[in-house]
Amino acid sequence: MEVFEEFIECLRSFSPGQVAVNARDLLRQNYNWPRLVRRFLASQDEDLFIRNVRTAHIPHVEPRVCMLHDEPDRFRVILHVFDLLQFRIYWNEGRMGPHFHHFSFSTRILRGSYFNWLFKNNGALETPRLEFEQQQRCDAGTVYFISWDKYHCVLAPEDATMSLMVRDRQSYNPGERPDPNYTNDMILCTRDRMLRLLESAPAEVSSRILEI
């Protein structure tokens, strides 16, 4: 794969609702993912990048969410970056913990690492009774898929850990989450940081599939 656009074209070939699970096999391929992502990110129009980030932004959580590509009602491609200091602030404020998503997804760690805790839910989706299942260490090259209703929790990320995520279409509506304090300058500073980090990320790392 020479350009990131080829990856997007491959994603378009999958049926709606099945994009994320099939993306796992694409993400496990040993391409130079940091270089592919960096070139695509650097080529994006500034205004388009800001619009995409605001569309997918979730306030007061880590990692920072930056949407690279959107196919409405089909899939989204997301780039994540962790800020360890901000993660610790949110953790101490009680904002971080076990959660489910409004989409199924596959992800590949591009640099850094974190621990992923998985839980069995013995209750209902919004009134859970969680039972710890397992802990998984996710390093650069780790690839995994999680169904939208699976409870999990990311812990102890290395600073500047980055991941590439493919999200399926929405399975659950979380409602609007505007963040008027997230300025355009902040968004562009995050982009510049991502570009620097991708440049120093390991070029080709052997993939490791985690079964969840």
Image (cartoon, rainbow, N blue to C red):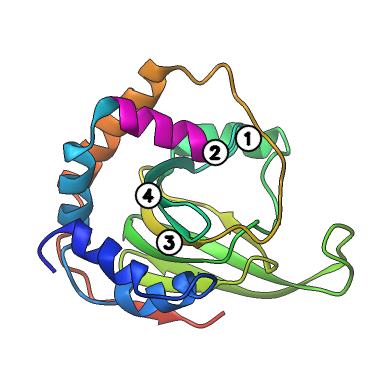
CA gap, disc 4 and disc 1: 17 Å
**Residue type indicated by callout 2:** Phe
**92 relative to 1 in the view: left or right:** right
Task: Return the residue at label 4.
Answer: 161
Residue 48 part of the magenta segment: yes
Pair 3/4: label in front = 3
Task: Return the residue at label 1.
Answer: 90
Q: Residues within 10 Å of mark 1 (few under 14, many from 20)?
A: some
Secondary structure predominantly adopted by residues drawn in magenta: helix
Label 2: state its secondary structure: helix
**Residues at marks 4 and 1 touching, judged by CB atoms closer than 8 Å:** no
Q: Residue at x 15, y 46 (%)?
A: 39
**Residue type indicated by callout 4:** Thr
Q: Which residues are magenta?
A: 47-57
Q: Which mark, by number, is residue 87?
A: 2
**Residues at marks 2 and 1 touching, judged by CB atoms closer than 8 Å:** yes
Q: Which mark, by number, is residue 166?
A: 3
Q: Residues within 10 Å of mark 3 (few under 14, many from 20)?
A: many
Pair 3/1: label in front = 3
**Residue type indicated by callout 1:** Tyr
Q: Earlier in the sequence, mark 3 or mark 4?
A: 4
CA gap, disc 2 and disc 1: 5 Å
